[in-house]
Image (spheres, rainbow, N blue to C red):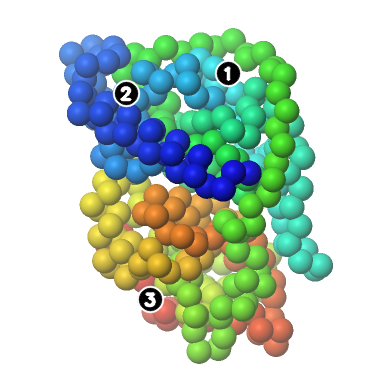
Amino acid sequence: MDDGSTRTSRRSVLASAGAALAATAGCLGSSDGDGEQPAAYTTPAAAEFDAVVDSQWLESNLDDVRLLDVRDEEAFGEGRIPGAHHFSNSEMFDTYAEETPDGFEADPEAIAWTLSQAGIEADDDVVVYGAESNLWETYAIYTLNALGHEGQVSLLDGGFTVWDAAGGETVSEAPEAQEATYEADLDASVVATREFVADNVDEDGAAVPILDMRSPAEYWGEDERGDLDRFGHVTGATNLNFVQSIDGEAGRLRSPEELETLWLDDAGLSADDTAVAYCQTAIRASVGWFVLDQFGFDDVRNYEGSWADWGTLSEDDGYYYTTGEDTGTVVDTFA
């Protein structure tokens, strides 16, 4: 891995390009048939955030990035952006890392093999897309960061739906396997293990912001998911349902101004904070991890085990939780 200067420089170049392209919205690409581009062809988040691009930017930079498609296999087979390779949800979720009785264990070999088959090397710039902008896309970005990816990994805001609606080129034939070598160099700084969480939580609350990205009903222990011993939330955690960060109608991230209101003003977070996001399985939490990373937080982590792990533990061993309706703090700015 580099010392961070290469990545910072690359992010600055990509961000500057995104801002410049946003200023010339509508000059590139095909229209939707009415002479206008889809609403999310250019997006506010792509103009502001280092790791967010839109369809306009991608059309002009398609040859300079590698593409990962996180939609289901059927959708991928029906049509994909040229050059894209499939990055299956099950592969990300089942083969990367887990909490065990002996602690946190990570095995990146299966994912590294998939990235190699996609022709991706650790210093390549990668764009991840799904149908729109949602949780699997950010989980893929988080996963590559956890693998120590050195290039920029960006979200296509609006996803394939906008690209296709704008008349972007698509292909349906299966991509050919590539020959590359992906060398993973795990970056544990983006991961919160159960012990990291436990070290920052006691019966009175949390020493750092702990962000529960589930629904309020899950947070209060009313919506019981999974075969667990307990339901509720990590003591001291603040609930901030992940869907609030996404403009569902437009299929993209909310604007930077809206996200600032949600995360910095109403949730009261600061870029100086060490923040931990969690949900049931770390997937929804990756949305929070991603947003805070774009806001420049120096230390933001995703609890890989999340409630599927914490819900199996005991307060007797120092894993504190709170349950009950109206307990804790719920931020519902865009609920």
Q: Secondary structure at mark 1?
A: helix
Between residues 39 and 142, which one lies in front from this camera angle? 142
Earlier along the polypeptide chain: callout 1 or callout 2? 2
Q: Is residue 27 left or right of residue 229?
A: left
The residue that label 3 is drawn on is 329
Residues at marks 3 and 2, CA–CA distance in whole angstroms: 39 Å
Q: Residue flagged by tag 3: what amino acid is it?
A: Thr
Quarter of the image where the N terminus is located = top right
Taking the view exactly as shown, the residue that stands out farthest to the right is: 102
Q: Position of residue 275 (x, y in %)?
A: 47, 66
- Look at the picture and state if 281 lies above or below 111: below
Judge depth for marks 1 and 2 and give the one in front.
2
Q: Residue at position x 43%, y 69% from top?
A: 273
* Residue 267 location, quadrant: bottom left
The residue that label 2 is drawn on is 56
Q: Residue flagged by tag 1: what amino acid is it?
A: Gly
The residue that label 1 is drawn on is 77
Q: Residues within 10 Å of mark 3 (few under 14, many from 20)?
A: some
Q: Residues within 10 Å of mark 2 (few under 14, many from 20)?
A: many
Q: Is residue 306 visible?
A: no
Between residues 234 and 146, which one lies in front from this camera angle? 146
Residues at marks 1 and 2, CA–CA distance in whole angstroms: 24 Å
Q: Residue flagged by tag 2: what amino acid is it?
A: Gln
